[in-house]
Image (spheres, rainbow, N blue to C red):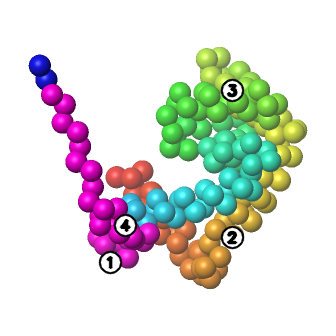
Amino acid sequence: MTTSKKAAAPRQSMVDEVYPTSVEGLDLEERLGYALRRAQLKVFKYFDEAMREYDVRPALFSALVVIEGYPGVTQSSLAQTLGIDPPRVVNLVHSLEERGLAMRVRCKRDRRSHGIFLTKSGETLTGHLKGLAEQSDLAATQALSEIERRQLLTLLRKVYASEETG
């Protein structure tokens, strides 16, 4: 016969304590990953609010911008450019096609590959979304001066580019 032990109820004094809502003074303040994640949450919050009407998430927006900049890009190149897994790109491109924003065209040189192109509505929407993304970036970083914002972008590019170069 087994007896189950019930978890001891917390002491009332522990339950009534007020717990902090910041990490001030803790080791987390010095962790880059923590700071990046907190910044990402804020930036994505503004981005999501700006793009809600269009049901566009960051990966979809990024794909639109890359396809606009490199008409005929292949799925594998798109995956590499965005730094995401190829199967995820397949889903992104499929979603863009379903929404009438992009189309795949078989490459003449390599019949196995397809180039991805924006449709007219994809081009129009991408132009509009780029303006919204810029506004959301500025809103999310309103505590920074323009110089600080450029410095932050430069430093972040340096961090993620170092992975690509070795």
Q: In which quarter of the image is residue 59?
A: top right
Q: Position of residue 149 (x, y in %)?
A: 59, 75
Q: Gap in Å between the C-alphas at discs 3 and 2? A: 31 Å
Relative to 84, 33 lies left or right: left
Which circle's residue, 2 or 4, is located before the other in the chain?
Answer: 4
Q: Within 10 angstroms of label 4, few (less than 14), some, or many (20 or more) residues? A: few
- Residues at marks 3 and 2 touching, judged by CB atoms closer than 8 Å: no
Q: Single out the mark in the foreground, 3 or 1.
A: 1
The residue wearing badge 4 is 16
Amino acid at dot 3: His
Which circle's residue, 4 or 1, is located before the other in the chain?
Answer: 4
Amino acid at dot 1: Gly
Image point (61%, 79%), residue name? 143
Q: What stretch is highlighted in magenta?
A: 3-30
Q: Gap in Å between the C-alphas at discs 3 and 1? A: 47 Å
The residue wearing badge 3 is 94
Q: Is residue 62 above or below residue 5?
A: below
The label on residue 138 is 2
Which circle's residue, 2 or 1, is located before the other in the chain?
Answer: 1
Q: Main secondary structure of the magenta part?
A: loop
Q: Gap in Å between the C-alphas at discs 4 and 3? A: 52 Å
The label on residue 108 is none
Magenta span includes 23 = yes
Q: Gap in Å between the C-alphas at discs 2 and 4? A: 41 Å
Q: Within 10 angstroms of label 1, few (less than 14), some, or many (20 or more) residues? A: few
Q: Where is residue 73 in the image (x, y as percent from the top left)?
A: 66, 36
